[in-house]
């Protein structure tokens, strides 16, 4: 083989390798883009399910694993402010005792 044929074969091999490299790079970029889009769609669907007005739990699953989720806003119910002299839950507060700090044995001078 003469030098001209060797150069043509080397250039053809290099051109093939360049196409393979570019094709692989484009493939991985598209694959990552599609994975991100799938992730975004899944999160968007989960948010929409959590916004249900009935506050029902909804299932999330991956293969054989499954959990039920609920919007935390559905769990937080406003508790009315206690009246004066009342503790949260409706219990009466214990009466305050007048303690003379000077005569108390718990507080030495």
Image (tube, rainbow, N blue to C red):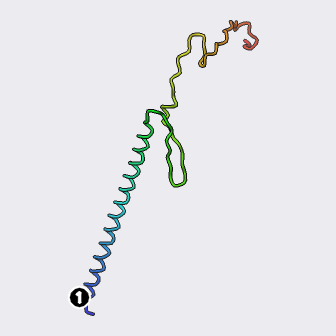
Location of residue 100 in the rendering, given as x and y in whole percent from the top left corner: 70, 6
Q: Quadrant of the C terminus?
A: top right
Q: In this view, does 105 lie to the left or right of 5?
A: right
Location of residue 63 in the rendering, given as x and y in whole percent from the top left corner: 51, 55
Q: Residue at coordinates 60% horizontally, 10% vertically from top-left?
A: 85
Q: Residue at coordinates 57% horizontally, 10% vertically from top-left?
A: 84
Q: Which residue lies furthest to the left in this view?
A: 4
Q: Name the residue under label 1.
A: 4
Q: Relative to the observer, which residue lies in front, 63 or 14?
A: 63
Q: Residue at coordinates 56% horizontally, 15% vertically from top-left?
A: 82
Q: Residue furthest bottom?
A: 1
Q: Is residue 18 left or right of residue 56?
A: left
Instruction: Residue 21: name its quadrant.
Output: bottom left
How packed mark 1 is, by other alpha carbons closer than 10 Å (few <14, some 14-19, many 20 or more), is few
Q: Relative to the observer, which residue lies in front, 74 or 95?
A: 74
Q: Is residue 52 left or right of residue 24?
A: right
Q: Is residue 6 left or right of residue 71?
A: left
Q: Residue at coordinates 32% horizontally, 75% vertically from top-left?
A: 17
Element on which disc 1 rests: helix
The image shows residue 34, relative to residue 46, as above or below, that is below
Location of residue 49 in the rendering, given as x and y in whole percent from the top left corner: 43, 40
Q: In which quarter of the image is the N terminus?
A: bottom left
Number of on-image labels: 1
Q: Relative to the observer, which residue lies in front, 21 or 86?
A: 86
The image shows residue 85, relative to residue 13, as above or below, that is above
Q: Relative to the observer, which residue lies in front, 55 or 20?
A: 55
């Amino acid at each position: 083989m003469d030098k001209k044929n060797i150069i043509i074969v080397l250039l053809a091999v290099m051109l093939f390798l360049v196409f393979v490299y570019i094709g692989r790079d484009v493939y991985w970029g598209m694959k990552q883009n599609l994975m991100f889009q799938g992730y975004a769609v899944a999160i968007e669907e989960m948010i929409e399910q959590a916004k249900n007005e009935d506050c029902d739990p909804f299932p999330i699953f991956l293969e054989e694993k499954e959990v039920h989720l609920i919007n935390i806003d559905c769990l937080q119910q406003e508790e009315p402010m206690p009246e004066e002299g009342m503790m949260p839950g409706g219990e009466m507060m214990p009466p305050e005792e007048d303690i003379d700090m000077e005569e108390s044995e718990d507080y030495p001078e």
